[in-house]
Image: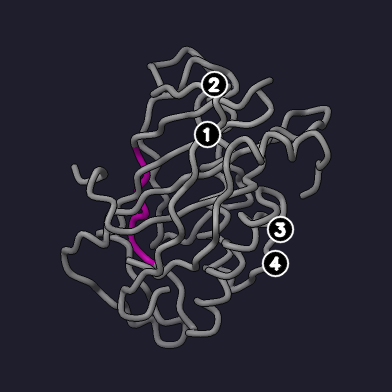
Amino acid sequence: MRARTAVTATALAAATALTLTACGGGSGGGGDKISTSPSTSASPSASTAAPSEANGASLRIDPTLKLPADLKAQFQWATPKNADQAAALSGAANYIQAIDHAVTKQNKSDPGLLGYSADSALTYAQGYVQQNVDQKLTMTGTDRYYGPTFTMGSGGASVEVKLCNDQSKLYSKEVVGGKVHVTGASDRNYVSWDIVMVKLPTAKAVWQAREVTVKEKALQCKQ
């Protein structure tokens, strides 16, 4: 499992307001993690739902975010029927894979990070990548995500995506020499992600991560 950098998440309502004014672009040594602050509640006008099985487009991962053969980001869910939920979920998956990709490239300014995140979501991602760079660590194993739920912002301009993350088969690996730091079973392997995705006003809709909260010991994610 891997360490996390603390970043404060804001309310979904604040992210919704952000879309009215902005349209910009976005390690573990010893297996420790750093918890982020708890996520705040969504705006009263938002609605929460779990995904239902879909007829919509399947998950699309940007091919420029391809990971090394020994590292896999695994996204296990049914595609939501709601088009905005499906698009926001794909955007969240690309944001997550962009973080993993940047770690493997040892580059906090990796183009994928800048394209799929902005604001505090980008700050979080770059901080996490820099932790790995400073410690000369990359990742190996399987980074598994599942159980998405959604809170829709008013007007459909933002979607809060919550995910579970199982890091029990994800390990730190030394860049020089390739030594893998294998960790044992622990509740800290179960992590929750709360990502506010915003739809950019572009000709081809792009969903970008703007806010994120990552919490370890998410026992609700144990399967």
The reply to whether dot 4 and dot 1 touch (C-beta < 8 Å) is: no
Distance, label 1 to label 3, CA atoms, is 30 Å
Which dot marks residue 111? 3
Q: Earlier in the sequence, mark 1 or mark 3?
A: 1
Distance, label 2 to label 4, CA atoms, is 30 Å
Q: Which mark is nearer the camera, 1 or 3?
A: 1
Q: Which mark is nearer the camera, 4 or 1?
A: 1
Which structural element holds mark 3?
helix
Left or right of 100 in this view: 209: right
Q: Earlier in the sequence, mark 2 or mark 4?
A: 2
Magenta-highlighted residues: 140-146
**Magenta-highlighted stretch: main secondary structure?**
strand
The reply to whether dot 4 and dot 3 touch (C-beta < 8 Å) is: yes
**Residue 208 place in picture, x, y as percent:** 66, 42
Which residue is at a point 53% across and 69% down the rendered structure image? 128
Type of amino acid under label 2: Ala
Q: Which residue is mark 1?
A: 42
Distance, label 1 to label 2, CA atoms, is 27 Å
Q: Is residue 172 above or below residue 71?
A: below
Which dot marks residue 57? 2
Q: Which residue is mark 4?
A: 109
Q: Is residue 158 above or below residue 10?
A: above
Which structural element holds mark 4?
loop
The reply to whether dot 1 and dot 2 touch (C-beta < 8 Å) is: no
The reply to whether dot 3 and dot 2 touch (C-beta < 8 Å) is: no
Q: Earlier in the sequence, mark 4 or mark 1?
A: 1
Type of amino acid under label 3: Pro
